[in-house]
Image (cartoon, rainbow, N blue to C red):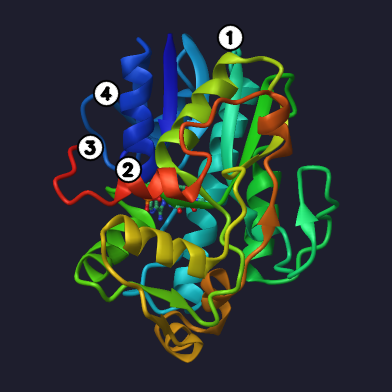
């Protein structure tokens, strides 16, 4: 059974590919660059999806928190296009396919929910209004996945993905390892998160269980703050985390609009995953950090 992964060369996609292969699936990656067992986005635009596609997943997207890129219009366009164009291209190809896949799984982010100290968000919360760049991005991204066909669609609104080979953990690992781990700003902002392995397992769970449908919050059930994350990760390394990275520094590095993503947060509950009885391997940040911290890590 074939699964297509848009962005299957990336941090999330490459682990997902391995997990799918371990379960006996045939995986075809969709990439900008041609290669073995790969299709390019142009191939999909020209020839559609392979007839034997059992499921399609899109985890492509330019990294929003790339500190080396200035947050100017060019970069903002690249961020938009890398998500919206790829997702709508795949959605159109699925709509036009003679043999429809069983499921279409798309990524989105918890940035669709407005940061708030009090509010608890689940999949039933009304999010019809966008309020900043990141929420607008999430709205457009989710809209792009509309297939106008009866293929089962799952939109995963992901929190920060914690895994050793990419994302936030890779960017901050050495800082924590040498005892300079920090939280951002006050640290009291909520920090919706999910372990990479649970995210990949949730994607496979969504492919394989036909009761999974629509928006699903891809976050761990434990709600924590950014400071709790920093303290727990440092302590799993037997190191301290003593000081914050000041909000002003985050704004200087990332620009004010992007800094919102790390200086503010939402309390997001994975109501649907819990309703489906999804078996989390890492439901608590302590369990996740115990897996993420060891230096002699073999992925
Ligand atoms: P990566 O930065 O690892 O990138 C994933 C893949 O996207 C790349 O391997 C690349 O594939 C493709 N890509 C990058 N830029 C472009 C572009 N301009 N146009 C088309 N394709 C592009 O991302 P992650 O694996 O960390 O994340 C995957 C998706 O999940 C992203 O959309 C991200 O926003 C979302 N997400 C991630 C979170 C995280 O904490 N990591 C949290 C919430 C959501 P190739 O070079 O082969 O074309």
Left or right: residue 5 compared with residue 237: right
Q: Are marks 2 and 3 in contact (CB under 8 Å)?
A: no
Q: Are marks 3 and 4 in contact (CB under 8 Å)?
A: no
Identify the residue at horizontal 21%, vertical 26% (top origin): 36
Q: Distance between the residues labelled 3 and 4?
A: 22 Å
Q: How far apart are marks 4 and 1 (CA)?
A: 21 Å
**Residue 292, percent from left and from top:** 31, 48
Q: How far apart are marks 2 and 3 (CA)?
A: 10 Å
Q: Distance between the residues labelled 2 and 4?
A: 31 Å
Identify the residue at horizontal 72%, vertical 59% (top origin): 113
Secondary structure of residue under mark 3? loop
Q: Mark 4 points at which residue?
A: 37
Q: How crowded is mark 2: few (under 14 residues within 10 Å), some or many (20 or more)?
A: some
Q: Name the residue under label 2.
A: 291
Q: Distance between the residues labelled 1 and 2?
A: 41 Å
Q: In which quarter of the image is residue 240?
A: bottom left
Identify the residue at horizontal 73%, vertical 70% (top origin): 117
Q: In which quarter of the image is the C terminus?
A: top left
Identify the residue at horizontal 55%, vertical 84% (top origin): 256
């Amino acid at each position: 059974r074939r699964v297509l992964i848009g962005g299957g060369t990336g941090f999330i996609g490459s682990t997902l590919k391995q997990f799918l292969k371990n379960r006996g699936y045939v995986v075809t990656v969709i990439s900008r660059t041609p290669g073995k067992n790969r299709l390019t986005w142009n191939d999909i635009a020209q020839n559609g999806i392979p007839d034997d596609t059992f499921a399609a997943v899109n985890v492509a997207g330019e990294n929003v928190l790339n500190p080396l890129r200035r947050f100017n219009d060019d970069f903002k366009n690249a961020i938009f296009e890398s998500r919206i164009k790829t997702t709508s291209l795949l959605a159109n190809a699925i709509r036009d396919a003679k043999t429809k896949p069983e499921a279409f799984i798309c990524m989105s982010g918890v940035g669709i929910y407005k940061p708030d100290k009090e509010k608890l968000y689940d999949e039933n919360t009304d999010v019809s209004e966008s309020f900043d760049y990141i929420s607008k991005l999430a709205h457009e991204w989710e809209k792009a996945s509309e297939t106008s066909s009866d293929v089962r669609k799952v939109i995963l609104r992901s929190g920060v993905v914690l895994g050793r080979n990419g994302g936030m953990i890779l960017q901050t690992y050495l800082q924590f390892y040498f005892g300079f781990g920090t939280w951002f700003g006050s640290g009291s902002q909520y920090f919706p998160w999910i372990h990479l392995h649970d995210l990949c397992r949730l994607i496979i769970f969504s492919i394989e269980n036909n009761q999974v449908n629509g928006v699903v919050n891809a976050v761990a059930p434990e709600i924590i703050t950014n400071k709790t994350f920093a303290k727990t990760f440092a302590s799993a390394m037997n190191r301290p985390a003593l000081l914050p990275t000041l909000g002003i520094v985050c704004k200087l590095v990332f620009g004010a609009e992007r800094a919102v993503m790390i200086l503010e947060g939402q309390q997001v509950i994975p109501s649907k995953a819990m309703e489906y009885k999804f078996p989390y391997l890492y439901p608590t940040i302590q369990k996740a950090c115990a897996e993420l911290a060891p230096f002699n890590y073999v992925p």
